[in-house]
Amino acid sequence: MNIAMLGSGFIARFYANTLHDQRRKDRILSVYSRNIANAEKFAADYGLSSYGSEMEKIIQDPAVDAVIVALPNHLHEEAVLACAAANKAVLCTKPLGRNASEAKRMLEAVEKAGVFAGYLEDLCYTSKFLKSLASIKAGSLGKILWTKSREAHPGPHSDWFWDKEKSGGGAIIDLGCHCVEISRNFIGKGVRPMEVMCWADTQVHPIDAEDHAIGLVKYENGAIGQFEVSWTFRGGMDLRDEVMGTEGTVWLNSFLRTGFEMFTTGKGENYIAEKAESDSGWLFPVGDEAHELGYPQMFSDMFDAMEQGREPLETFYDGYVVNAILDAAFLSAKSKKWETVKLEDWRGEGSGSEEKSQVSYDEKYYLIKKELLPNGEAKVILKDKVTGEIKQVTVKN
Ligand SMILES: NC(=O)c1ccc[n+]([C@@H]2O[C@H](COP(=O)([O-])OP(=O)(O)OC[C@H]3O[C@@H](n4cnc5c(N)ncnc54)[C@H](O)[C@@H]3O)[C@@H](O)[C@H]2O)c1
């Protein structure tokens, strides 16, 4: 693929490092930046043949196969609409929009134009995530009941994130988009998100947006997706997920504990990891950040999907659903009530009931639980199928 990069900041460089790493064949051809000096520097750093400060000109170049939108949130819609108008495949970073209305307009534009569109949700492509998702899809955890996804760090690296108008919100939109999409994958993308309860506050920073939030997303089948997001966390970048099902559990730690521990007195200047707050003492570096964060796997899926004429694992429709869930979270943080997720365009399963599994113990009882005791006996807790009475029986194991 010949790629045009829109933006030359933090994520554009992460993407470029990934795309031009390890002898990959897809290449960035050109870069757009509003500041021509930044565009020139980016082009020089990655050996690009062209650069410019006019976005449409870069998009419309006939040599470009796909455009990556790596611009601040308030510019995603304009960039995506320009790609659709130019009939170009487009890959957009997260969050898709600042809200569901923006995301829906982007979704409609690419679908109307018939262009390939991918949602660059890297955390749904980490090796750990993909392997646990495969286990969950194979039934290893049974029915998923509760997911918990956390992203917390000391706050983002550029001015526009902190400006609610430009970003669309604080930690909820910036980090909640990852957590919500991780939970949707584990619970099942076909299961409809129904309502959200969210607490949010501005605990530390002098900004209008929230710098900390905790939310619960209730799904139609009774599953709960919990998100915990913060720009107030000290000690680096905490990326953790938990999944609990009727048959098992998964715990993932994607960044702060990847199995690499190091001590240094601080001699020698060293980059440790994204958002690391210290470069001395006991440290937790990350070996290959792009890989740990899922970027190579994500781009492979995107470009394979384009070539194979299929949808990528993460689509603009997913980005739209995430935005709709986050819209409800913002409402709930204000109203302090459960708020309905408004999805004008729902493409998942129809109304599924909240079925609960009842395991028969014998003709008369359901089995609630069996536990082996320290003395070697086993206790079973039973419920009478007719009267509902609950009782326990000790049995020889
Ligand atoms: N894990 C991830 O997927 C991930 C991580 C970080 C950022 N992002 C997303 O990437 C996007 C960009 O974030 P970033 O961290 O690279 O930000 P950044 O501030 O480092 O870079 C933004 C780029 O856009 C340019 N820009 C800023 N304002 C502009 C304007 N008004 N007009 C034109 N260009 C402008 C900047 O000069 C810079 O090149 C955001 O949507 C963010 O949410 C995704």
Image: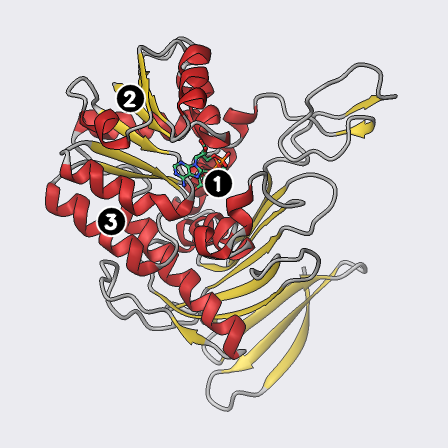
Q: Position of residue 250 (x, y in %)?
A: 56, 46
Marks 1/3: CA–CA distance: 31 Å
SS at circle 3: helix
- 361 up-or-down from 153: above or below: below
Q: Residue beneath label 1, please?
A: 132
For the residue pair 239 and 56, the one nearer the viewer reads as: 56
Classed neighbour count for the residue bearing mark 3: other residues with Cα under 10 Å, few (<14), some (14–19), many (≥20)? many
Residue that appears at 47% across and 83% down: 385
The reply to whether residue 98 is in sight is yes
First of labels 1, 3 by sequence position: 3
Residue that appears at 33% across and 64% down: 192
Q: Residue beneath label 3, please?
A: 106
Q: Is the residue under label 2 in contact with that under label 3 (CB below 8 Å)?
A: no
**Residue at the outermost right position:** 265
- Going by the numbered disc 1, the residue's amino acid type is Ser
First of labels 2, 1 by sequence position: 2
SS at circle 1: helix
SS at circle 2: strand
Residue that appears at 75% across and 26% down: 261
For the residue pair 1 and 189, the one nearer the viewer reads as: 1
- Going by the numbered disc 2, the residue's amino acid type is Ile
- 282 up-or-down from 191: above or below: above
Residue that appears at 24% across and 49% down: 106
Q: Pick the quarter of the image with the N terminus.
A: top left
Tell me, for residue 3, which label it has, or none: 2
Tell me, for residue 269, which label it has, or none: none
Quarter of the rendered image showing ligand 1: top left
Marks 2/1: CA–CA distance: 31 Å
